[in-house]
Image (spheres, rainbow, N blue to C red):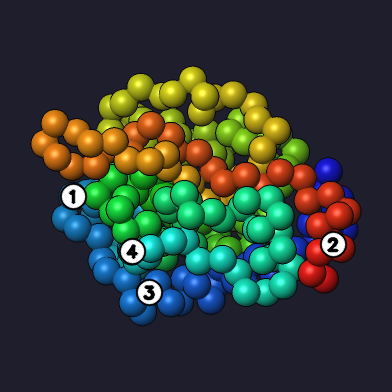
Amino acid sequence: MITEEQFTILLPLAVEWAKENEAIILQKGVPLTESQVADACTLGISQVNRIRLMKVTTIPVPNEPSLKAAAQATNLITPQTAGLTLRYGIFIRSDCLGDRRLIVHELVHTSQYEKLGGFLPFLQKYLHQCITIGYPAAPMEQEAINRAASLIGYAIDPGELKVSSHISFFSVTSDEPQGTSDGSQNHTNGIRCGAFAAFQFQLFALSF
């Protein structure tokens, strides 16, 4: 189990990485579509015009040694990770760009950033919940799951309501896309956070 001391060390590194990558997305990403703006407004996001989506082949992994070690050791960010919200900047895996459920889920996290007041309070609260309560039972993750379900009108997968030994770290993964009757891709099988698991002391031996 991660200790308070370890959490204190890693948190500012995560905040800095999140800020740097939000800046990249805001510079290179694209604004929300009209329908996405409508969803964002329904969710109560106040600065909808600041949001940008950036499609990527895979979600970027931190270069900072300790964060990279954490991501690699715990499968935090994998090739299957479909979305990553960094306040107003959202990475979306290119084959998931049309997945409304995923994007609404990510937009809920943007609304949480706004309500809590930025990177530090969001990451501190979200990560602490995931570490102490577990994913997906963490209240902030449940809010994203439930609000997306309510807005779009889909049934929540029972697996999204179970307490898991895996712990999330601001990322959402999607199962392999399934074809739909109109030939488009459907990613509604499995929004779930990437494994963060327990850092444990062995993590600190990897790349610190």
Q: CA distance from mark 3 to mark 2?
A: 32 Å
Q: Which of the two labelled residues, at mark 4 and mark 1, occupies the earlier sequence position?
A: 1
Identify residue for label 2: 204
Within 10 Å of the Cα at label 2, are there few (<14), some (14-19), or many (20+) other Cα atoms?
Answer: few
The image quarter in which residue 52 lies: bottom left
> Which comes sooner in the sequence, label 2 or label 1?
1
**The N terminus sits in image quarter:** top right
Measured from the top left, where is residue 36 in percent x and y? 24, 52
- Residue 102 is left or right of residue 84, and the answer is left
Q: Residue 201, can we see it?
A: yes
Q: Which residue is under mark 1?
A: 35
Element marked by disc 2 = helix
Of circles 2 and 1, the one toward us is 2
Residue 182, percent across and down? 11, 36
- Disc number placed over residue 55 in the picture, else none: 4
Q: Amino acid at mark 3?
A: Leu
